[in-house]
Image (cartoon, helix red, strand yellow):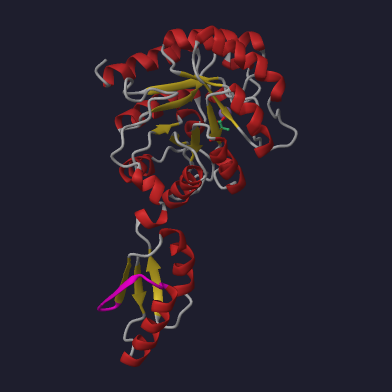
Amino acid sequence: MIINLVHGLSTRALKTLKKRLSLLFAGARLETARDRILVTRFETGKMADAAAAAGNLPGVAGSELACGELYPLVTRTKGLSLPARPLDFVKNPFIFIAGPCAVESEKIYLASALALKKAGAHALRAAIFKPRSSPYAFQGIGFGGLSVIAKAKKLTGLPLVTEATDTRQLEKLSGAVDVIQIGARNMRNYELLKETGRSGMPALLKRAMRSTLREWLLSAEYLLKYGCKTLILCERGDSVFSGDRAGLDLKIMRQAKADCGLPVLADPSHSSKSRALVEAFSLKAAMAGADGLLIEASVSPETALVDGAQTIDLPAFSALVKKISKLHGS
Ligand code: PEP
Ligand code: MN
């Protein structure tokens, strides 16, 4: 950690500050270099609070924590091979997690699941709880949908990815699905992150709207710290400029990939909000190094209660899988 000092600090003030810092960072090594102090060999778990306390001391202009100090567990995944289960990122250079935005009718969901499997999907979106901006909008079919998604799993053999919107859903969901999705709105729901970690379930963490890389990876750190062993990240986009939720941030996606060894997916559906743009967004993400897509696709987008306008149909999904496979030379 680096502590930046106020410019032109007197020798006396510096001496007092160093004394205070050595108490605050007891046991650490402190090295002064011009207008900064480098703190090393300090317990990672105490770093955040000590850095905040140091920021209050007279003579301190600010502090900078290294990635390994901010999110050590996330950083430690760097160089590790990508997890093989329940999604085989080793065997498949590009993973498709596909399905309607929400599970609605059993008939459409099962028909979609079978057709998506045939077209090349590696896992199914299986959302039965939907976080909606309006309390009057369809909130998902809830636990009543467990039997539907179980049938889809049995029919296709594909793993299920489902969003948990509340800690109270975790126990039942853990017994029924393969990956717990933490949606963009809940990226900052720290109790949900802790409980999902404790459940030991593989997790998929979306980046929240308007969140920084640092916030995103800190949320990933929560999951890992509380017990998650298999974690997938997903860039879902937003746009500060247009004020809507569209716009894939490929820079942040690439930086996340550079800072850790976790697989990073892109969501071309929620980031484009338009079926006409889904293929372009998907290809862009694939070319920028995404490890796969979380994508809305169904045999009947036109009847969907949620996100139909950004859901692609089966011919479009099939064509996209072929184009991306060509990009990856398979
Ligand atoms: C979703 O993937 O179903 C979803 C709700 O997306 P987001 O959390 O990114 O809005
Ligand atoms: Mn959706």
Residue 101 visible in rendering:
yes
Q: Which residue occupies the foreground of this view, 200 or 233? A: 200
Residue 142 x %, y %: 70, 25
Furthest-right residue in view?
Answer: 136
Residue sitting at 38 percent across and 57 percent down?
A: 69
Q: Is residue 328 left or right of residue 166?
A: left
What is the quadrant of the C terminus in the image? top left
Q: Say whether residue 258 is magenta.
A: no
Residue 129 visible in rendering:
no
In this rendering, the answer to whether 168 lies above or below 277 is below
- Image quarter of residue 277: top left
Residue 60 x %, y %: 40, 78
Residue sitting at 52 percent across and 44 percent down?
A: 226
Residue 234 x %, y %: 45, 35
Number of marks present in the image shown: 0
Residue sitting at 50 percent across and 14 percent down?
A: 313
Q: Which residues are drawn in magenta? A: 25-35
Q: Is residue 33 left or right of residue 92?
A: left
Q: Say whether residue 26 is magenta.
A: yes
Q: Which residue occupies the foreground of this view, 315 or 254? A: 254
In this rendering, the answer to whether 203 lies above or below 215 is above
Q: Is residue 284 left or right of residue 241?
A: left
What is the quadrant of the N terminus in the image? bottom left
Q: Which residue occupies the foreground of this view, 143 or 316? A: 143
Q: Where ligand 2 lies, by image quadrant?
A: top right
In this rendering, the answer to whether 176 lies above or below 253 is above
Residue 93 x %, y %: 31, 23
